[in-house]
Amino acid sequence: MKSNGSYRSYRSHVTNVTFMTSMTHKNHVVKETAADFIESSTDKAADKEHRRKINFNIGRYNAAVPNGKQQFFDVHLAREKAKNIKWKAIETLDRQLEKFETAITKRGAKLIWAETAEQAREEILKICQEKNCRTLVKSKSMVTEEIHINEFLEKHQITSVETDLGEYIQQLDGEPPYHIVTPAMHKSKEDVAKLFAEKLGTDPNLTPEQLTLVARQILREKYKEAEVGITGANFIIADIGGIAVTENEGNARLSCAWPKTHIVVAAIEKVIPSMNDLALFWPLLATYGTGQQITVYNTIITGPRQQNETDGPEEMYVILLDNGRTNILSNVKSRESLYCIRCGACLNACPVYKNIGGHAYKTTYSGPIGSVITPHLKNMEDWKHLSYASSLCGNCTEVCAVKINLHELLLENRHEAVEEGSSSFAERTAWKMWKLAMLHRGMMNFGNAGLKDWFVNTAMKSWKKHRSELEFPKKSFNQMWRKKYGKR
Ligand code: SF4
C-alpha cells in the first residue's frame, strides 16, 4: 500500500482480494457463519431477560426521538435533503476525497489511503512504533472495530484504551459493541455495577453516577500516559478539509487534543461536500441517534496544531479506509447504503434486532444496515443469510435518517445471492414448484385442503422448523368465485 496513493488506483485490486477470499472459504465458512447466526439468534430470542433490557433501553430512545424531531420545520424534507446531499457526495466520491486530501494536507495533516483493514492496521502500528507508543487512547469508532485494532495492537504490546463510557464498559467485559450508537445497550445499571466490582474492585452497589466517576478517574490518567490518540470521523468535510466528530462525553476531544499524535480512521463514505451541510447533518444525527436536538460536543478538526496555536496534537494522520466500500460503490443499486450516517435508528426500529440483539449477527455492523452492507463488505456467499433475517416490514426504511430504502436493499441482496448461484437446491426447487403451480391453475385446484396441507408441510420441513404449519383454506379461490358469481 502506498501512502498518499490515488483512491482510484486500488479499485481493481480490492475486487480481486474479495473474490479470492470468497473462493477460498466457500465450502465450510458458508455453513459456519449462517449456522452461528441461527444458533445465537435462536438462543437470544428465547432469552426474556435480554429482551427486557434492550426493549427498556429502546423504549427510552423511542420516548426521546419525538422531542428531537420537533426542531425541524419539516422532518421529512430534512431527511430528503440529507439524502440528496449524500447522493451528490457518493456520486462524486473520488473528487470529494481528493478535495479533502488537498485541503487537509495543506494544513499539515498526513493522509494515508488504506485499501484493506490489514493495511490500515499496519499503518497505525508503524506510526505507534515511530512514536514509541505503549498506551493509546481511543474514542468510539465503529470503523476501528471493523479493523479490529485493539486486538491487533495488544499483540504488539500496545494498550489501546476505550474512552467512551459504553465502549469502556464493553472493553472491561471483553465484548465487542452491541449497538452502533449505544455499545452497552444490553446491560442494566446493575450489570455494570457488578462488572466494575469484578474487574475494578469497586462496591457492587454503586449508582450510575458513582460508576461514571470511577471510569472518569481511571481514564483521566490514561490520557496523560497516552502517546497517541485515535478517533473516528462522523463526517469528512471535503471543502475545508476537516473531520467532524460528534460525542456526548468530551472523550473524543481529549483523545485527539491531549496526546502528541492524533490518528483519524475514517471510512471513505463519510464524506459530505461542504461544512455548511453540517447545519443539517448534526441535528439530524443527534435526533435519530439519541433523540437529542444537538449532541453535546461537536468538533471540527482541520489539521495538527498550527504555529500560532497553543494546543492540539503535534502530528495528525488521517487514514481513509476502503475495505470493501468500493464494491458497494460499483453496485448501482446498493450504492445507496453508503449514505448511512450510522445513527442506529434502523436497529432500534427493527423487530428482528429487538429480539436477537446486536451480538447475534457476529458482525461489526448489526441490524438492517449491517445486513445490507456486510455481504458486500465481506462476501455475499458467506453473509447472505443476514439479508434473510428480516420480515421486510419496512420499519427500517420508515425511520432511516437519510431515507435509505433498506428493506428493498435486503431484497436486492437476496436477488443477487440467487443470481450468483448461492441459493440452496431445496430453495430453488421450492420456488420452481411455486412458479409452476401459480402458472397452472389446475395444479392449485388439485386435491382438497387436507392433501395440500400434508404435501406442503412435508416438502417444506426445514421452513416449518421455526414457523407454524402452512394451512390452506378449505375452498380454493375458484370454488369461492363460482359460489359467489356462478360459472362464467
Ligand atoms: S441506515 Fe439509516 S437508520 Fe440505519 S444507521 Fe444508517 S442512517 Fe441510521
Image (cartoon, rainbow, N blue to C red):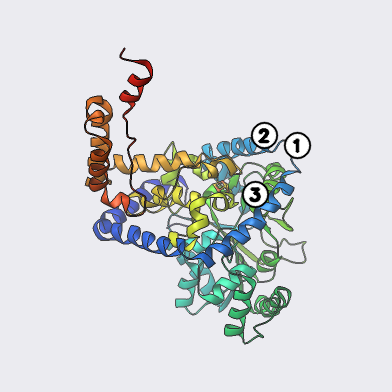
What quarter of the picture does the N terminus occupy? bottom left
The C terminus - image quarter: top left
Q: Nearer the viewer, residue 103 or 246?
A: 246
Q: Residue at x 48, y 76 (%)?
A: 154
Say which quarter of the image contains residue 24: bottom left
- Label 2 environment density (alpha carbons within 10 Å; few <14, some 14–19, many ≥20): few
Kind of residue at badge 3:
Tyr
Q: Are marks 1 and 2 in contact (CB under 8 Å)?
A: yes
Residues under labels 3 and 2: Cα distance? 15 Å
Callout 1: few (<14), some (14-19), or many (20+) C-alpha neighbours within 10 Å? few
Cα gap from disc 1 to disc 2, whole angstroms: 9 Å
Q: For mark 3, what is the residue?
A: 288
Residue depicted at 63% across the width and 75% down the height:
190
Give the spatial CA distance, label 3 vs label 1. 16 Å
- Expressed as whole percent of the image width and height from the top left, the position of residue 135 reads 58, 77
Q: Residues within 10 Å of mark 3 (few under 14, many from 20)?
A: many
- Viewer-side residue, 429 vs 69: 429
Toward the viewer: 310 or 121? 121
Question: Are the residues flagged by discs 3 and 2 in contact, CB closer than 8 Å?
Answer: no
Residue marked by disc 2: 77
Q: Could one spot residue 107 in this view of the protein?
A: no
Q: Identify the amino acid type marked 1.
A: Phe
Compare marks 3 and 1 and give the one earlier in the sequence: 1
Q: What x and y, as percent, mark residue 50?
A: 53, 66
Coordinates of residue 487 in the picture (x, y in percent): 30, 14
